[in-house]
Image (cartoon, rainbow, N blue to C red):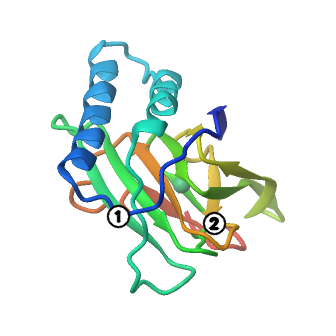
Amino acid sequence: MRIIGSTGTATQSVTRDSSQNAGDAFKDLGSKVGHLLDLGSQKIPLSEIGSLLAETLDNLPILSPNTDTPNCCYERELLFCDPKGRFTILGLCWKPGAETPVHGHRAWGAVGVVDGKIGNRSFEKVCTDGEPVLTQTGEIIAGAGTVATVDQDPGGIHALFNPTQKPAFTVHIYGMDLSEDNCAVNIMYAQQGASN
Ligand SMILES: [Fe+2]
């Protein structure tokens, strides 16, 4: 996972923003990502997409978790689907203490922290006695304004978590069509030993 930038300047208050303006902000971001991909290079311009997300974070609305969701849960919301099916933008609303399983991605990705703080634990697959085992290689805590890019599996195996007692909101751009199943990008791993 590569950190693009950390501005730490987000100042919006946490509200569930379902207004037309909220939808327009994500649609505008999606149009700009689509334009970068339209430029026609064979190579995915991941660092440019990360930079675009970093420049946009301060202008994105904040979505908060539903109040009836139990603590330690997180919610995924589909925000934009590329009409050509090349990428999807998701919003993740994090309750205090929420944590994902260890996972990799079936596609490239860019992640931005819009509000709150999010932790990332990195893992790598190593062979022990002929068996693949996941070993933690690092941990960071990222504040609002931070953007990171992640490679398609087997690079970038990680788990995200909310280390605070406050909600957090992150925006994720993944290089595949998730309109049918917004979890389809994930390759899940057992905590001990790789399952895929
Ligand atoms: Fe992830």
Mark 1 residue crowding within 10 angstroms, few (<14) / some (14–19) / many (20+): some
Q: Nearer the viewer, residue 8 or 71?
A: 8
Relative image position of residue 102 (x, y in whole percent): 62, 65
Q: How many marks?
A: 2
Three-letter code, disc 2:
Asn
Q: Disc 2, disc 1: CB below 8 Å?
A: no
Q: Which mark is residue 162?
A: 2
Quarter of the displayed picture in which ligand 1 can be seen: bottom right
Q: Is residue 106 visible?
A: no
Q: Is residue 29 above or below residue 73?
A: above
Relative image position of residue 143 (x, y in whole percent): 66, 49
- Give the quarter of the figure containing the N terminus: top right
Task: Kindly identify the residue that appears in the image at 43 percent across and 19 percent down.
Answer: 43
Relative image position of residue 178 (x, y in whole percent): 28, 53
Q: Nearer the viewer, residue 104 or 117?
A: 117
Relative image position of residue 134 (x, y in whole percent): 74, 62
User: Dot 2 lies on which element?
Assistant: loop
Residue marked by disc 1? 16
Q: Is residue 140 above or below residue 34?
A: below
Q: Is residue 121 above or below residue 64?
A: above
Image quarter of residue 27: top left
Three-letter code, disc 1:
Arg
Task: Kindly identify the residue that appears in the image at 25 percent across and 29 percent down.
Answer: 31
- Give the quarter of the figure containing the C terminus: bottom right
Left or right of 70 in this view: 163: right
Q: Nearer the viewer, residue 160 or 117?
A: 117
Left or right of 139 in this view: 176: left
